[in-house]
Amino acid sequence: MVTRAAVLLLATRLVACTGPEAPPTTGGVDVVAGAFGRGLALVMSDYQSTNVALIDCNGNTLSGSFLSSGAALPGVSAPLSGDVVLPGELQEGTELALIDRYPAAVITLVDVRTGDVTRQLDVGTGFRANPQDLVTIDGDLWISRYETNAEPGKLPFDAGGDLIVVNRTSRELEARIDLSAAMSDAPGFWPRPGRLVRDGGRVQALLAAYDPSFQNAADSRLVEIDIASREVVRTHRLEGLAGCGALAIEPAFEEDGSSRPSRRVVVGCSGRFQGTSAPALEASGVVLLEPTEEGLGEVRRWSASELTSRPVGFDMTFDAGGKVLVTAMGRLADGVVGDRPDALVEIDLASGTTRVVLETTSRPFELGGVRCATRVGADAGGDGAACRGDCFVADGEAGVLWRLVRGAVGYVALETIEVEDAIGLPPRWLGRF
C-alpha cells in the first residue's frame, strides 16, 4: 500500500545495498495447538532479503530460519522478496501462508511441521496486484488485492481492487468479490483493500481509498462481506479519516476462557500522505466500532493528536483485557527539525485514556507488527498454564522483539528478545499460528 511503500523506500536508504547470505533453514516445528494457539511467526527483513522465524507464545525461538529468501527448496519457483508480510488473523491448520506483496503477488504456503513449501500461488493475474492480507474460511483463501488493473479483461479475475477466493482443494482462483461499488460516492478513487478480519458470518475489509497516483485519498471505509453469498452487504465510511491501514478484532474468548458474545473492531488511520512521508494529522486517528443490529457502528474516536501527535502506524492489536496497542509513526528530518522516533501507544477502551509504552531509540519507520498472545480456544488445559499472555512488538532499529507485560498502570516493555542471530535481519512483522 502507498503508506508502507513510501516508508519502505525511505527505510532502504538506511540499510546496506546487499542483504547478508541466508543461513541454512532450521525447518518446521511439531507444536500442538492449545488454548493460546501454537505461537507467533516473525518476518525479518531489510526490505531486500527476508527470513521467517517461529517462536512460542512466550517469545522463545522454535525455528530461527523457518524459511528465507535464499532457501533452495523443492516447490520454490519464486524466492521470497524483501516485501513479505503475514496475515493479520490467526493461521490454523498445517500450513503457514506468507504474502509476497509488490511486485511479486505470490502467496507461499509452507508446512509448519516440516518447513517444506507446499504450494506457491500467483495471484497477480497479469498485473501487479499487490496482495495485502488473507483469511482462511472453510479451507478457502480469501485474499485482498490492493491494486486496480487499469486495463482488465485479458485474463480471468484480472480487474483488481477486490478480494479473490482460492479454492481449498484445487488451489485455483474460483471467485472475485468486486469492491469498486464501495467507492461510488468518490469517483476517481480506487478501493485499495488491505487488512481483513473474520467476524462471525462476515468478513470485514478495510479500504484505504487512494486515487491512482496516490496523491490524494478519500475517506477510508470498512466493508462488510457476507461469507455465504460472497457479496458486500454494508459499507461504513470513516468520515474525516484517510489512509486507514490497521485493523484488529477483539479476541473471541475472555481471559477466563469463556466465549465473548460480541466482538468489537478497531481501525487505525495514518492520514493523507500526498506524496510525502509525513501525513497530516487531521485525517489520522483510531476508531472503535461495536456490533449493532444493522452491523458495526462507530462508538468512539481518538485523534492522532490525542494519542501522541504522531500519525497512526500500520499495525494494532487487542489484548484480552480491553486494551488496544497501536504503533505511531515518527518523522524523518526535514531540514528544520530532526528525526522523531516511532511510538507504541496503549489505549484503554473502558476509560478512553492513552499512554506511550515505548519509543524507538532515534529512527522513524522502525516499529512494525504488534501481537498479544490471547486465548483462541476455551480449553483451560493444554498450554494455558505455560503461556503468560504477554504482548510483543517488532523493533527494527534495535533488531529485537520487545516483550510487553501488563502492570498496574498499563503495559511495560519488560525485556528485549533476539530471535535469530545467524543472519541478523531486523524484525518487521508478526502473525499468529
Image (cartoon, rainbow, N blue to C red):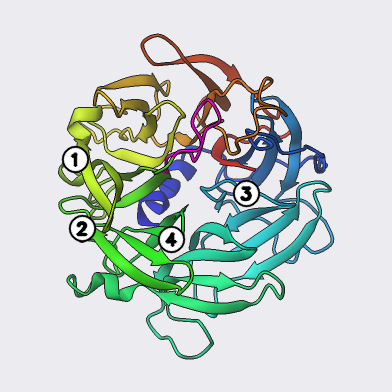
Label 1 near label 3: C-beta < 8 Å? no
Q: Residues within 10 Å of mark 3 (few under 14, many from 20)?
A: many
Of tags 3 and 4, the one toward the viewer is: 4
Q: Earlier in the sequence, mark 2 or mark 3?
A: 3
Amino acid type shown at disc 2 = Asp
Pick the front one: 136 or 343: 136
* Residue matched to label 2: 219
Q: Residue furthest bottom?
A: 154
Helix, strand or loop at disc 4? strand
SS for callout 3: loop
Q: Position of residue 217 (x, y in %)?
A: 23, 60
Mark linked to residue 281 = 1
How many other residues sit within 10 Å of disc 4, few (<14), some (14-19) or many (≥20)?
A: some
The magenta span reads 249-260
- Residue 54 appears in the rendering: yes
> In this image, 219 relative to 342: left or right?
left
Q: Amino acid at mark 3?
A: Gln
Label 3 or label 4, whichever comes before in sequence order: 3
Of residues 322 and 1, which is closer to you in this image?
322
Given this view, does label 2 or label 4 mark the residue nearer the observer?
4
**Mark pair 2, 3: CA separation:** 30 Å
Give the quarter of the figure containing the N terminus: bottom left
Q: Quadrant of residue 153?
A: bottom left
Labels 3 and 1: the sequence-earlier one: 3
Tell which of 87 and 249 is nearer to you: 249
Q: Kindly identify which residue carries mark 4.
A: 202
In front: label 2 or label 1: 2
